[in-house]
Amino acid sequence: MKREIIQKIEVPENVKISIEGNMVSARGPEGENKKKFNFSGLDVRIEGNRITLECKKATKKEKKMINTAMAHLRNMIEGVSKKFEYLLKICYSHFPITAEVKGNELVIKNFLGERTNRKCRIPQGAEVKVDKEIITVISSDREIAGQAAANIEQATKIRKRDLRVFQDGIFMINKAGKEI
């Protein structure tokens, strides 16, 4: 059944949004985010401090597109207003693990007593800080911050050992302001 769907987002005063074709850019006090959307079949407008996505004869497909675009736009606005912060904790019971940032890589030393260092890539746009046993990932783009945190967590994945015994690793404890 086709029906009219209209969704609106309030934009804070300190955030500036511009739409050029399918490219949306948000600029605020914490930086700038750009993202390419697929707005085919949707009407996108900026009216004052409000973004409106509208579809006159929307099916399930258009409803999904509108809701997904709205979630991404909210994340962009929130990211340029206040950066997203992920916290990870270094946990070990066998060998003391240390981590340090070198360029665009995080180097994990002495994981399970391994002589070779484990490395994970940090995406461009993410800032990583290591403070003893807490690793902080900060970015104005939620997807980049989440990917950086996931890369760090995956770098310490344990293979070919009993996971009940070897519970060492780096684990997320706070995900964009929400406790896990």
Image (cartoon, helix red, strand yellow):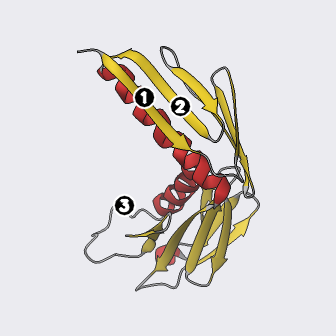
Badge 1 density bin: few <14, some 14–19, many ≥20, Cα 10 Å: some
According to the picture, the residue beneath numbered tag 1 turns out to be: 6
Badge 1 element: strand
Which amino acid, by three-letter code, is at mark 3? Arg
Q: CA distance from mark 2 to mark 1?
A: 7 Å
Looking at the image, do the residues carrying marks 2 and 1 touch, with CB atoms under 8 Å apart? yes
Q: Is residue 84 left or right of residue 62?
A: right
Which amino acid, by three-letter code, is at mark 2? Thr
Q: Nearer the viewer, mark 2 or mark 3?
A: 2
Work out which quarter of the rendered image holds the C terminus and state it.
bottom left
Which amino acid, by three-letter code, is at mark 1? Ile
For marks 2 and 3 on the same chain, the one whose residue lies earlier in the sequence: 2
- Residue 169 falls in image quadrant: bottom left
For marks 3 and 1 on the same chain, the one whose residue lies earlier in the sequence: 1
Please give the name of the residue rendered at 63% of the width and 23% of the height, measured from the top-left corner: 22
According to the picture, the residue beneath numbered tag 2 turns out to be: 52
Badge 2 density bin: few <14, some 14–19, many ≥20, Cα 10 Å: some
The correct choice, above or below, for 131 with respect to 124 in the image is below
According to the picture, the residue beneath numbered tag 3 turns out to be: 159
Outermost residue, front direction? 48
Residue 160 x %, y %: 33, 61
Please give the name of the residue rendered at 50% of the width and 78% of the height, measured from the top-left corner: 90
